[in-house]
Image: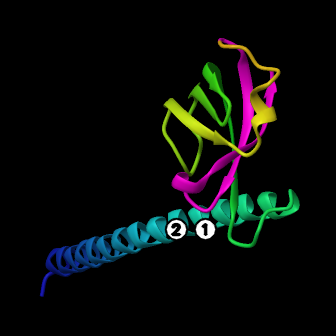
Amino acid sequence: MPVWQVALVLNLTFAIALGVGYAGWGRRVGTLDRELDAARAQVERLERERQACAGGARPGEQQWNGRGVVRAIYPRLLIVTHEEIRGLLPARTTSFRAASPALGASLRVGDPVRFSLRGTVLDDAALVAVERW
C-alpha cells in the first residue's frame, strides 16, 4: 500500500474518531448543564428556607426579598408593582397579604419599598417586612 493511502486512511480514522468523541462530549455537556441548573435551583430554595428559618419561620417555609413601588394600601393587603422576585414571580403588579395590619401603616401610595415575603408557595406567602428605600 502506498504511503499516501496509509496517511489518508489514518487521517480519516482520526477525523471519524474526533467527530464521534465530540458528539458524545456534546451530549454529556448538555446533561451536565441541566444537572447544574437543577443544583443551582435547589441551592436557591435551601437558601430561602435558611433565611426564613433565621427569621423565625416554620420548617419548609421560604423567604423571598423584593423591591417595588406601592400602588394601593388596604388593612391586610398591599398592592405593589415589583421587580422580578427570583424563584417566585416575574416583574408585575401583585397584591400581597400582610402578616400584620401595622406593616402598611407608615407607607403611602407611590413609595418605593423593599419587602420580604415568607411562605411555602405564592398562594400562602405573606409580607413580613416592608421598608422605604
Residue drawn 32% across the image and 73% down it:
18
Image quadrant occupied by the C terminus: top right
Q: Which residues are magenta?
A: 110-133
Look at the numbered disc 2 and give the secondary structure of its residue: helix
Mark 1 and mark 2 residues within 8 Å of each other at the beta carbon: yes
Taking the image as shown, residue 108 lies to the left or right of residue 11, namely right
The residue identified by callout 1 is 42
Q: Nearer the viewer, residue 132 or 39?
A: 132
Residue 3 lies, in percent from the top left, at 20, 79
119 up-or-down from 22: above or below: above
Residue 97 lies, in percent from the top left, at 62, 42
Taking the image as shown, residue 2 lies to the left or right of residue 113, namely left
Residue 115 lies, in percent from the top left, at 73, 35
6 up-or-down from 45: above or below: below
**Image mark count:** 2
19 up-or-down from 129: above or below: below
Numbered mark located on residue 38 in the image:
2
